[in-house]
Image (cartoon, rainbow, N blue to C red):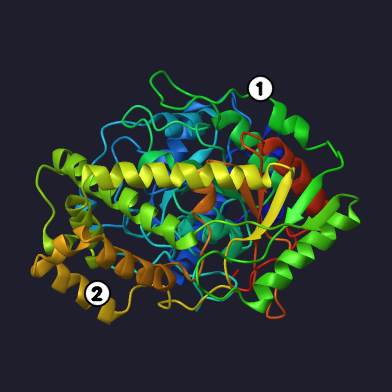
Amino acid sequence: MSIFKEYGDYDGIGLAELIKTKQISPLDPLDSAIDLIEKIDPKLNTVHRKLYHDATESINRNKDLEGIFAGVPMLLKDMDSALANHPMTQGSKYLKNTIMPYDNVLTKKFRKTGALICGKSATPEYGLMITTEPVEFGPTRNPWDTTKTTGGSSGGSASAVAARIVPFGHASDGGGSIRIPAASCGTVGLKPNRGRTSFSPTHGDKWGGFTHSGIVSRSIRDTAYMYDSLFGFEVGDPYGVHYEKGSLIDALGKKEKLKIGFNHQTRIPVEISEEAKKAVMFNAKLCEDLGHDVEEATLEYDGLLLSRAFVIIISAHVTQMFKELKELVGHNFKKKEVESTTRLFNYLGKTFSASDYTWARYTTQKIARSVMEQTNKYDVMIMPIISQPPANIADIRPKKSAELLNEIIMSLHLGGLFNIESIRRTVLDGLAPQSLWYAPDAMLQNITGQPAISLPTYWTDNNLPLGVQFVGRYADEATLLSLGAQLEETAPWIQRIPEVI
């Protein structure tokens, strides 16, 4: 096998057009992706499982090249989308040898586009960290600087797309996990609206409706065409948002004048760096130069209260997840099979009461309503997604002292202290700045359900990406993609190539 020389110059739609017009063989892009995985992945650790045979078989089954991305290689994130006859390890030793018996709906939709799943991309354990550094598999590295984080939890896909191993990769977002890696790696990352993509057949939602599935990519048009193929709800899904087929694609050519607000503050007591603020202002100026009405906007909500409620909801769902996994694996996890932070989430999930959970749901929904009322006068809001340029590897993972504290809480059964409101508030409010400093407000759009996209328009003097997010009104991804297409034309990023290649 050899690399198709111009492979990295094309996005997914471009590669598919070359294949359909017989300018290249359907095997050429896949061979190139495989060669790049073999060449570059040892430096980046983006792929947890290689699926070359599966991808080749997909070509053999699709001789007529059906699907908009027929013959285009991609990665499937190693969580949130099951692939029959392969493990879905979710970054955990506990699941390394557990074979999934089915393709879920999202996997089937990826296959229906004609895309070739050639590997499973790296993720932190159960997607619970905003950096992709699972203990079992080791850190995934940023192709722009291999000492830096990719963000998480879709860090494997974002790193591989940025390194031009594949033009797009599956990603999911429960608290920023599409947008944070996109901002860190210089890719396009659209978190779709709640209810756009289905977790059928096993789940109605994930994390109480906070989790959304999609992709990271290098181009706006790949994002539009793929989401046009993925959107749609299944029978029994708890949320249903009507989607007009083709509307995302039609939006690429629209250039309506928009009212845009920008805000570069955080509601968590952490520092937004001057570089991150500069990135927001840079994008605001780009939009203004395009002829849009741009103004500074205020946004008020209690960030610590929201983070407290978020932790309660996520902990409860982690506990439920392990009940489901016990049925799949056949036994409870052993201590050595699951990381300390994950086990603490599970422990807290058993500690919080049903009334704690309902309070948290009420609180998040109340804040969501307030935030959307404040921002509804704007077509788009520009906000930070990460607080600084990509952080160093190991800086975001819990420190040894924090892990020791986790073990003490669990071994001494101190969870009951969290039932005392004053203690719970003090502990959780103290943890928020420690755990959310890299992406303090990323969870907000998971809670409101609004669509939000991170775009790689801004780069530091050290050639590091620092994406910011553009937030749309509820169910209005089309406006985000329309604006994204304009920004891509004005400040093109696709010609940037990381040195790791």
Residue in the picture at 50% in, 59% down: 302
**Residue 223 seen in the current view:** yes
Where does the image place residue 21, in percent across and percent down from the top left?
A: 73, 32
Q: Are marks 2 and 1 in contact (CB under 8 Å)?
A: no
Residue in the picture at 48% in, 71% down: 437
* Apparent side of residue 406 relative to residue 447 in the rendered image (left or right): left
Residue in the picture at 77% in, 46% down: 483
User: Residue 465's image quarter?
Assistant: bottom right
Residue tagged 1: 244
Residue placed most toward the observer, 406 or 16: 406
* Apparent side of residue 423 relative to residue 115 in the rendered image (left or right): left
Residue placed most toward the observer, 15 or 336: 336
The quadrant the C terminus occupies is bottom right
Image mark for residue 403: 2
Residue placed most toward the observer, 321 or 393: 321
Residue in the picture at 46% in, 42% down: 365
In the image, residue 84 above or below residue 131:
above
**Residue 16 seen in the current view:** no
Look at the numbered disc 2 and give the secondary structure of its residue.
Answer: helix
In the image, residue 341 above or below residue 322:
below
